[in-house]
Image: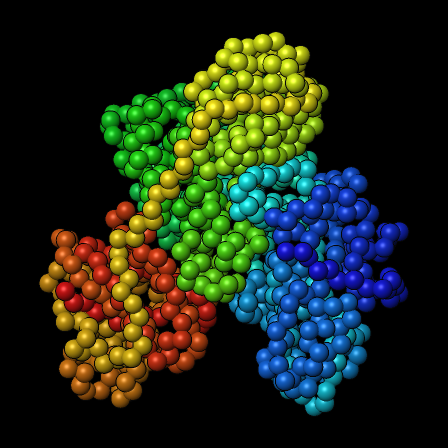
């Protein structure tokens, strides 16, 4: 979408005496005008729109190039105006569409709300101008199409008034994640005007030095959404998720850090910026979030940066802390939890936001095994780095740790059956698995299209890397489009913290998302940018083979789904660029000075008749000498040119044959969703519950009414994560569920509810134990008794494997009572998540055969 930018006629001079973080304005004019009030940063102005246009990018500044961006740069700002506007009621606002133009001229004639959409998520704050606003207004901001709410309160505020400008300043840092802005007119004494409106967006200078492009437009959007997510999460001194005031706005170590650092380098060439953060985390006093796995991802960050830069001084500086973290991992490998009560075992054992990993709720068996595989991977990767450095003592020590644990594992010949998809991906990436083990893990976990996706894009990114190591490149592209593509179809322009692919079908475009184990879902979390790394390293195929890209492999993996890929990976030696087109046979590789490569020309399951390089025959089944090329050979997938010297090479490949079509796995959801029922209300007898039922807290707090079916041995309510609620025990209101199948007598309105707004308690679950296979129908009754406008997300999960069994469903408008009806034949976990405040509720479960 072409971005509409806020344009003012001329530069408005800042008022004398305004307090700003920098009083020295740059000489050049702001690119899209300036605000009539003082802002905390200087305007973007020193560069130019000299980069290429990229239709796939949501970034308004994708073409902008700063002359020399540095890690020490301050934040800068630019202005945006709305792309679209709605008013409710429309009669209260005259000429409201002028807000999308350079000359807003709205007359406010009545109470109501204006909603403006700025087209994409931004790190920003919201302002409007009025010469005669009498007050009695509020302003809201949001990542989605309704005013946002969080654990600490709504993102709605009485704005600060500065001259004729009204600013929604919701925290001392000014910025929030903003796509939508709202102006609420609560009362009116006389008509008044809106003459200006803007989003003030902050940005740390960084240019798109990396790139990715292929013949699948969705993959291109995925890459640029990821890159943009990192870019707007770069603060002055570190990168951090926007996370609407969830106390996480600080320099992180660990998983988050590892995933978005790589994208920062590959997409934006932010090597110095990444380096200073890794050093701060891994040199005294260091930064440690007290999460066990995060220490190991710190080590992987060190290894990754060293492999990309060859910076030995950096490695030396981080070495002591890396050793300590790896040593602690050996102590924790079996026990896993040290017994230190300074924080909970659930927190220390965090591996990611997924039912199988446990989040902050519990340490699952899959969580423990995933940690163990991560230990082996970190030891082995660090040992390789130590070998490069000539430190054979450290190399042997950490290889020894790994080999000892691998030997323990293999006492059980089917050790890998204890792993879920996360653990399988880690084990395969660790590089110790045998071919038959990889094949068994792949068949067990990577072929399940639904459950090879994790709840967070960060964790799914790790799974994609493991799938690639197993050679499942087409499955990776399918999975990538299933999750990242789903968020784009939902309306996302940045990578969210958590998102189930099926949620896109349950939610409307840009609706409030489903919350979960992480608490309030952020729609901009840069750990999802790991996809940029994957696409450049695996699909485009550019990877260093010696630290600092002295030597590099360029082996693209287009699979059966793609015919063309092109892109650039920026390195400290210069840009490495490549293009491969297996349809036209035209390929290109460009290597900077100091870089020698192996280049693989993909066979794409066809026969290569000949290859010309710079118009000279180089291959026709055997190698023919070409300037700049050392030699060539072939394997089943590539013709490989070795010792390729710095320079530019045009390849013309003559193919024979056809690449077979790609066949995607089918999404399988074994639990059947039957439908909704809004007419029965609380009079369930005769329709539901013939075999049994549970009415939580029906006779008061903690006093359920229960009649379990013969095939159900237990129904466990998540008392730790939910609150009991009894609205009334004496009512004739038909919305309240009846006490019995006769639908007679006085009724109670009660249930369980999530513990909103307590952080990470936006979810609860009910476990139903069915020890033997038995076909049954289950109806869940939801009641918004006090008509608060609740909205709920519902998941069906296997309580043993913790896999998803049904698509996500959304329950809304349930003040009159609403049933969701499912059919299944085994045990079941029902997870209920808040979407819209004040909480999520459940008032009954009913069973029939």
- Can you say whether 76 is above or below 417 in the image? below
Q: Quadrant of the N terminus?
A: bottom right
Residue 472 % position (x, y)? 40, 33
- Can you say whether 174 is above or below 609 in the image? below
Q: Quadrant of the C terminus?
A: bottom left
On the picture, is 280 further left or further right than 676? right
Q: Nearer the viewer, residue 154 or 806?
A: 806
User: Which quadrant holds residue 12?
Assistant: bottom right
**Residue visible at 75% across and 41% down in the picture:** 69
Residue 570 % position (x, y)? 66, 32
Q: Nearer the viewer, residue 439 or 338?
A: 439
**Residue visible at 53% across and 47% down in the picture:** 218
User: Is residue 95 something that shows in the picture?
Assistant: yes
On the picture, is 57 further left or further right than 432? right
- Can you say whether 334 is above or below 73 in the image? above
Q: Nearer the viewer, residue 348 or 621?
A: 621
User: Is residue 394 something that shows in the picture?
Assistant: no
**Residue visible at 10% across and 63% down in the picture:** 710
Residue 251 % position (x, y)? 60, 46
User: Which quadrant holds residue 719?
Assistant: bottom left
Q: Nearer the viewer, residue 405 or 102?
A: 102
Residue closest to the far front: 656
Residue 152 % position (x, y)? 53, 66
Residue closest to the far bottom: 189
**Residue visible at 72% across and 73% down in the picture:** 98
């Amino acid at each position: 979408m072409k971005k509409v930018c806020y344009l003012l006629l001329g530069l408005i001079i800042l008022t004398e005496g305004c307090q700003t973080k920098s009083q020295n304005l740059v000489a050049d004019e702001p690119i899209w005008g300036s605000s009539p009030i003082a802002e905390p940063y200087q305007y973007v102005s020193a560069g130019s729109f000299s980069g290429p246009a990229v239709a796939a990018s949501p970034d308004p500044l994708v073409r902008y190039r700063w002359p020399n961006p540095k890690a020490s740069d301050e934040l800068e700002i630019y202005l945006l105006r709305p792309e679209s506007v709605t008013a409710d009621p429309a009669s209260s606002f005259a000429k409201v569409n002028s807000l999308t133009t350079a000359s807003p001229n709205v007359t406010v004639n009545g109470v109501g709300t204006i909603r403006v959409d700025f087209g994409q998520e931004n790190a920003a704050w919201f302002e409007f101008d009025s010469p005669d606003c009498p007050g009695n207004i509020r302003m809201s901001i949001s990542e989605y199409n309704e005013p946002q709410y969080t654990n600490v309160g709504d993102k709605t505020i009485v704005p600060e008034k500065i001259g004729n400008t009204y600013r929604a300043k919701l925290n001392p840092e000014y910025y929030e994640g903003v796509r939508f802005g709202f102006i609420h007119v609560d009362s009116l004494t006389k008509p008044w005007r809106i003459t200006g409106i803007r989003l003030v967006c902050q940005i740390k200078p960084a240019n798109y030095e990396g790139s990715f492009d292929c013949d699948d437009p969705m993959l291109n959007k995925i890459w640029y959404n990821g890159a943009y997510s990192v870019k707007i999460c770069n603060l002055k001194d570190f990168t951090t998720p926007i996370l609407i005031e969830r106390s996480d706005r600080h320099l992180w170590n660990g998983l988050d850090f590892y995933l978005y650092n790589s994208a920062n380098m590959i997409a934006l060439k932010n090597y110095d910026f990444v380096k200073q953060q890794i050093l701060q985390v891994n040199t005294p006093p260091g930064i440690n979030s007290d999460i066990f796995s995060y220490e190991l991802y710190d080590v992987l960050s060190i290894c990754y940066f060293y492999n990309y830069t060859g910076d030995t001084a950096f490695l030396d500086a981080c070495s002591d802390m890396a050793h300590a973290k790896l040593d602690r991992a050996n102590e924790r490998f079996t026990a896993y939890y040290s017994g230190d009560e300074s924080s909970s075992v659930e927190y220390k054992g965090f591996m990611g936001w997924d039912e199988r990993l446990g989040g902050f709720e519990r340490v699952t068996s899959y969580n423990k095994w995933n940690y163990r595989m991560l230990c082996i991977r970190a030891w082995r990767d660090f040992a390789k780095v130590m070998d490069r450095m000539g430190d054979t003592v450290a190399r042997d020590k950490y290889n020894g740790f790994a080999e000892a644990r691998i030997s323990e594992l293999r006492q059980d010949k089917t050790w890998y059956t204890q792993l879920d998809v996360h653990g399988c991906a880690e084990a395969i990436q660790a590089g110790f698995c045998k071919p038959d083990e990889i094949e068994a893990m792949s068949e067990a976990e990577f072929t399940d299209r639904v459950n090879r996706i994790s709840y967070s894009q960060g964790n799914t990114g790790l799974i994609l890397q493991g799938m690639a190591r197993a050679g499942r490149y087409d499955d990776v592209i399918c999975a990538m489009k299933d999750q990242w593509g789903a968020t784009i179809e939902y309306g996302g322009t940045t990578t969210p913290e958590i998102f189930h692919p099926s949620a896109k079908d349950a939610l409307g475009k840009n609706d409030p998302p489903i919350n979960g184990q992480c608490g309030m879902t952020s729609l901009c979390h840069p750990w999802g940018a790991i996809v940029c790394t994957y696409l450049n390293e695996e699909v485009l195929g550019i990877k260093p083979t010696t630290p600092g890209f002295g030597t590099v492999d360029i082996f693209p993996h287009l699979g059966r789904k793609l015919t063309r890929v092109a892109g650039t990976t920026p390195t400290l030696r210069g840009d490495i660029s490549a293009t491969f087109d297996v349809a036209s046979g035209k390929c290109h590789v460009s290597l900077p000075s100091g870089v020698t490569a192996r280049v693989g020309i993909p066979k794409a399951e066809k026969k290569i008749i000949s290859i010309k390089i710079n118009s000279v025959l180089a291959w026709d089944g055997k190698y023919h000498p070409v300037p700049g090329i050392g030699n060539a050979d072939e394997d089943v997938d590539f013709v490989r040119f070795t010792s390729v010297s710095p320079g530019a090479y045009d390849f013309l490949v003559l193919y024979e044959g056809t690449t077979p079509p790609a066949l995607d796995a089918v999404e399988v959801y074994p639990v059947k969703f039957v439908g909704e029922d809004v007419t029965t209300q609380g009079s369930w007898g005769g329709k539901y519950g013939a075999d049994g039922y549970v009415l939580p807290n029906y006779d008061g707090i903690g006093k359920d009414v229960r009649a379990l079916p013969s095939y159900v041995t237990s129904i466990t309510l998540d008392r730790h994560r939910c609150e009991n609620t009894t609205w009334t025990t004496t009512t004739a209101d038909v919305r309240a569920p009846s006490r019995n199948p006769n639908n007679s007598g006085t009724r109670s309105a009660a249930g369980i509810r999530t513990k909103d707004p307590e952080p990470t308690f936006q979810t609860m679950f009910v476990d139903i134990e069915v020890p033997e296979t038995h076909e049954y129908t289950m109806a869940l009754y939801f009641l918004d008794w006090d008509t608060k406008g609740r909205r709920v997300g519902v998941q069906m999960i296997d309580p043993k494997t913790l896999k998803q069994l049904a698509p996500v469903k959304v329950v809304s408008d349930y003040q009159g009572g609403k049933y969701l009806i499912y059919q299944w034949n085994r045990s079941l976990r029902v997870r209920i998540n808040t979407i819209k405040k004040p909480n999520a509720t459940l008032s009954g479960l009913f069973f029939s055969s």
